[in-house]
Image: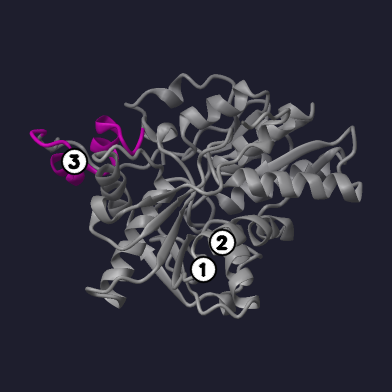
Amino acid sequence: MPIISSPQDFNVEDLYVDLRPVLGCPLYLKCEGFNFAGSVKLKAAAQMIDAAERDGSLTPDSILVESSSGNLGVALSIIAAARGRRFVCVTDPRCNPATMRLMRALGAEVRVVSRPDAAGGYLASRIAYVRELCASDDRYLWLNQYANPNNWLAHYRGTAPAIDRGFPGLEVLFVGAGTTGTLMGCARYFRERGRPVTIVAVDAVGSVTFGGVPGRRLVPGLGTSCRPALVDESYIDDVVYVPEADTIRTVHRLSAHGFLFGGSTGTVVSGAERWLAAKYPGADPVAVAIAPDLGERYLDSLYEESWLRRHFPDLVPELFPGAEPDPLSEPTVEAPAEEPAAAPAGDAARELTAVTDLTDLTDPRRSRP
C-alpha cells in the first residue's frame, strides 16, 4: 500500500477509461486527475520547483509567483504548503471560484487580473503583472511555465513513458494545448525514439497558440491569448480546434455515464472524437487522449444551468431536457473591474484586483468573462 509523506509523491499513472461504451469511439482516456492537485499539472509543478531548488534560484527567502488559469496554481499551492514556502498565483476572472478557494485554503495568495489583453484574453496581462511584481522585489521568483523546459521535461520523463509502457502499439496520441508542456514533452519523447505515433494537438477555438484567430473563451485550461515559448510545431502532426459549446456538450455526455471530467478533458475528447471520425472512419486504431483534469471544480460553471443560461443559452434545452431558453439571456462579458484604490504602481498593476472576498465570485448570477 502507498505510504507518503509529501502530497506530490502520490499520482495514479496507469488508469485509463475505454470510451467505446460511452462515445462509440476507439479512444482510451489517460486519467491524470487522481492526485492531490487533481490534475496533470502536479508533475510540472514538482519538476519546476525541484529544478529551482537544485540550481539555487529558489532560496529560503524566495516567494514563488506564477500566472495560472487554475490547475497549475493548485499544484504549486500544494507543494508550496508542503515545503513551507510562500506562493502568489496571478489568475483572471475565468478561473473557477472553487479553484480560487482551494488555493487560498492551501495558503496561497490569489490575485486576479481583471482587464483583458489586446487579444481579448488575459494571459498577456497576467504575465505583465508577474514581470512587474518580480521587478519590484527580488524575492519573487517566477517559474514561468510558458518557457520553462522543466515543464515539458516532466512529461518527457513521466507521462509519455507511462503511455508507451501501457500501449506499445500506440498509433495516435491526443494532447490538449495550454502552455504546451504536456504536448511538447510527449511529442519529443515519441519522435526521438522513432515511434510512428501521430501527435494531434487539441486547442480551443479563440486560442492563438497555433496561429488561430483570437476570440472569446470562457472555459479555463486550454488555449492561450499569446503564443507560448515552449511550442515547437515541428513535433506536431495535426491540430484540432474545438468550440467551447462542443467542450460543454462532451463533458455532459461523459457525466451522463458517471465520468465527471473538467473542461480541458472535454475539449480533448471532443477534438479526438471528431478527428478519429474524419481520419479513421469505421477503423479501430490504437488511440490515447490525455485527460488533464476532473470535473468537481467546474460544478458552478460548465455543469451549472444558471451559468449556461447566461453564457450558452442555446445549450440549455439540449443539456437540461424540459428547460426552456430564457429569451432575455444572452452571452455577456463583464465590464472591466474598477481600478483598486491601493493598487501597486505601474500599468500592469493597475489592471489587478486583489481577491480578498470570493463571495461575489461564487454567485452563479454573476457574469464572469
Q: Earlier in the sequence, mark 3 or mark 2?
A: 2
SS at circle 3: helix
Which quarter of the picture shows residue 239? bottom left
Residue 114, image x, y percentages: 53, 39
Position of residue 87 in the picture relative to residue 138 (left or right): left
Q: Can you identify the residue that label 2 sits on?
A: 165
Q: Which mark is residue 168?
A: 1
Residue in view at x 60 percent, y 41 percent: 11
| Mark 3, other Cα within 10 Å: few <14 / some 14–19 / many ≥20 | some
Q: Is residue 149 placed above or below 97 in the rendered structure?
A: below
Q: What residue span does the magenta drawing correspond to?
A: 301-323
62 w.r.t. 164: above or below: above
Q: Secondary structure at mark 2?
A: helix
Among the two numbered marks 3 and 1 on one chain, the one whose residue lies closer to the N terminus: 1
Q: Which residue is mark 3?
A: 319
Q: Residue furthest front?
A: 1
Disc 3 or disc 2, which is closer to the eye? 2
Residue drawn at x 64%, y 32% as measured from the top left? 2
